Structure formats: C-alpha cells, structure tokens
Image (cartoon, helix red, strand yellow):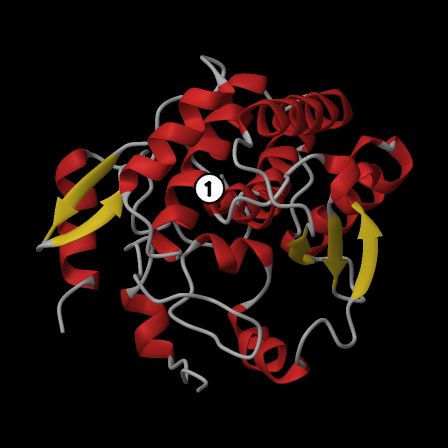
Amino acid sequence: MRTRVSPESIGKSCFAGSRARFRWGELSEPLCYERVSFPLARVFGIAELGEHRGLIPVPALAITDSGWLGSQIEATARRYRYDRLPDIGVLWWYSASSVLLGLPVESRDPGLDSVTLFLHPDGRILDARSSVVLDDVGERLAEALSVSIDAVARQTGAPRRALWAIATDSLASRVLWAGQPTSVAEKLAAGVGPSLPMPRYVEVSGRLVVRRASCCLIYLAPGQAMCTSCPRQTPEERIRRLTASLEP
C-alpha cells in the first residue's frame, strides 16, 4: 500500500525520525536532507517510477573517480546556484551519505565495491543497493566512509571532520527512518571507530529526533532556508521550531 505524501507531512517530518519504513513503491514522510538530495516536487515522480525504472545504475566506486565526482560536484553547484567548492562538497556528501548509510542499517554490505548507486538522469543519487548481507558491517562501513570522505575532501577541500559529522547524522536519521532502535546506530558507529562521532538523539514533544552534529550548509545557497533541526541555531530556537513542526 502506497503512503501518499502531502506538503504538510513533508514540513512536519523534518528530521523528526519517522517510524514509517521506506520501500520501493512506498513513500513515507521524507526527512529534511531529502530536499538536499532532490527537490521535493520530484518526490511524487520517484514514487511513480517503480523499482529503479528510469534510473541509471553506477558502481559506487565511481565516488573515488575524480572525473565522475567532479561532475557531481559541478552539477550540485549549478543546481543550487552556489559555487564555494568546500561548501558544495559538504552539500553533496550530505545528500550522498543519506543514501549510502541506509545499507548498513539493513545489514547490507556498504563496501563501495559491493554497492550500486541509482541516479536520476540529471545526476542526483536517489538510491543505493547491495545484494550482500553481512552479520557485522563495521569494518566494511569504516572503509567505505573513509574512502568516500577522503575523495570528497580531496575534490572540494571540504573539512574531513565536517564530512564525518554529516555521516553520523545520516546514519542516525536512517536508523529512525527504518524504525530501528537507537542502539543500532550506536552499534554501527562503534564498529566504525572514533572517526565517526556517536549518533545523538533527543526527545521533542514525545517524539525522538536526531540531535544533529552537522550542518548541510544549504542555507548559504540563494533562496534556501536553514533546516528546522540545524545545529547552527540557538538550542532554544531549534527546540521551538522542532516542536512547532511536530504539532498535529
């Protein structure tokens, strides 16, 4: 059964840790980082595509190819009409990591040599798949994140520390999105090691949300606003906006 998405549900689900599960053919309340990945107007179109129909498969190892990654960065800069390279690197990784980090949550091998990315024809990464199931993904996840983050940092000059923090928030969000307990995020982060900060959560209006450690920097682009859960707000403003977004 497909869940219909309305603008109201999108606005109120901003990093709120939806317990609804996402499968192809279904679409539940998207999180804020999805508007970084692709305009919200496209959400309906993706739901109608079916399983990867119309999407372009690309080996995830392409992330380590400077030519391919460079074209991704350039496309992101054009999309947001913003050209400060380190910031665009952060913005692109915020989007890409939110897709990649769904795999370890489902005990799928996140190693880049096992993963296929699925791209919209305009280049946006909309899904990642791995057919390999692992009991312990820690070592493979650590390697995949390290290699990807190093590639983005070299290509754009984005700070590695910021990119690792973004990976933490993507992991934390994907765990909530999948309806998994927060202990899953903690176990996965511990398996990666100290480079990946421990995911953090906080309860707002009786609902668990990610206490973010990173900023996607989307608000720096023309016409874009600061996310509801952005850590660059004062704690009071963040809680006020999150509380308002969760009101029925």
Q: Quadrant of residue 235?
A: top left
Instruction: Tell me what residue is drawn at x 70 percent, y 20 percent.
Output: 150
Name the one closer to the observer, 80 or 58.
58
Q: Position of residue 42 (x, y in %)?
A: 59, 75
Instruction: Residue at the far front: name it.
Output: 135
Q: Where does residue 226 sit, x and y in percent of width and height?
A: 38, 48
Under circle 1, the secondary element is helix
- In the rendered image, the residue lying farthest to the top is 194
Looking at the rendering, which quadrant does residue 61 occupy? Answer: top right
- Total count of labels: 1
User: Does 165 sit left or right of 122 as displayed?
Assistant: left
Q: Quadrant of the N terminus?
A: bottom left
- Quick check: can you spot residue 223? no
In-image side of 211 versus 60 (left or right): left
Q: Is 212 left or right of 137, judged from the image as shown?
A: left
Amino acid type at image mark 1: Ser
- Up the image or down, 78 lies above or below 56; here it is above
Residue plotted at (55% across, 52% down): 222
Crowd tier of the residue under label 1, counting other residues whose Cα lies within 10 Å: few below 14, some 14–19, many 20 or above: many
Dividing the picture into quadrants, the one containing residue 100 is: top right
Q: Position of residue 45 (x, y in %)?
A: 62, 81
Q: Name the spot of residue 114 as percent of width and height, x first.
A: 75, 41
Above or below for 209 versus 122: above
Q: Nearer the viewer, residue 21 or 207?
A: 21
Pick the quarter of the image with the C terminus.
bottom left
72 in relation to 41, above or below: above
Determine if residue 189 is in view: yes
According to the image, label 1 marks what residue? 170
In the picture, measured across the screen, residue 60 lies left or right of residue 163, that is: right
Seen at 33% across and 50% down, the residue is: 180
